[in-house]
Every structure is written in C-alpha cells, then in structure tokens.
Image (cartoon, rainbow, N blue to C red):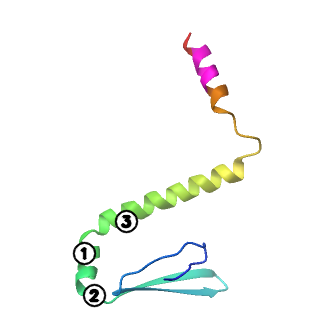
Amino acid sequence: MRTPVCGTTLKLLPPVAVSTTNNTQGTQHELSISDEKTKELLRSKRDLIYDMRSEALEEVGMANAITEGRTNDFVSEDAVLSTLDRTAE
C-alpha cells in the first residue's frame, strides 16, 4: 500500500505499480502495468476511462470552486424548504 500526497491510501494489485516524484514543477505520478491482459483491457476501455477521469476532475474542480467562493455560512435545510413552500403557494 502507498500513501499519495493527498493522504488517501491505495491498495494495488501485483501487476500495477505507482511511483510518485516531486520536482520544481509539482508532483508527478507514474502508473506502471506489467500484465498484458490488464494493458489490453485498459486500451479497449480507453473512452470509458477518459470519461470517468474527466468527470472526477470536474467534480474536484467544482468542489474547489465552491470552497474558494464560499464567503458566508451555509443556509439551513429548513430555510430552503420554507422559501420553496412560500414560492409554491
């Protein structure tokens, strides 16, 4: 098991290895796959993997934007529901 910079723990299967290096341009991660069947599976599902990665990056970007842009307290659920009830009437 490895602990990446973000603090989460990855458990990898034997044919897959991840190495992390830090340099002046930031952190770089390298994925190494030694099993041919695993490589072929990843090649055949390239579009799916790309879409999943893009969605994940969008979610992280949205979460970061919300965190950076938030300047006040959260509104309670009751306040939201009462406003919606008044609007619906």
Query: Label 1 sits on what residue type?
Result: Leu
Q: Which mark is residue 9?
A: none
Residue corresponding to mark 1: 41
Q: In screen coordinates, is 4 left or right of 70?
A: left
Q: Earlier in the sequence, mark 3 or mark 1?
A: 1
- Answer with the quarter of the image where residue 31 lies: bottom left
- Looking at the rendering, which quadrant does residue 81 occupy? top right
Mark 2 residue element: loop
| Magenta stretch bounds | 81-87
Q: Which residue is mark 3?
A: 50
Q: Quadrant of the C terminus?
A: top right
Q: How crowded is the residue under tag 1: few (<14 C-alpha within 10 Å), some, or many (20+)?
A: few
Q: Dot 2 corresponds to which residue?
A: 35
| Residue beneath the point at 69% across and 34% down | 75
Task: Tell me the quarter of the picture where residue 73 sits.
Answer: top right
x then y, percent, for residue 23: 64, 87
Q: Is residue 54 above or below residue 1?
A: above
Q: Residue 77 in magenta?
A: no
Q: Position of residue 48 (x, y in %)?
A: 31, 63
Query: At 27% from the left edge and 80% from the top edge, which residue is drawn?
Result: 38
Mark-to-mark CA distance, 1 and 2:
10 Å
The correct choice, above or below, for 82 with respect to 20 in the image is above
Distance (Cα) linking label 2 and label 3:
20 Å
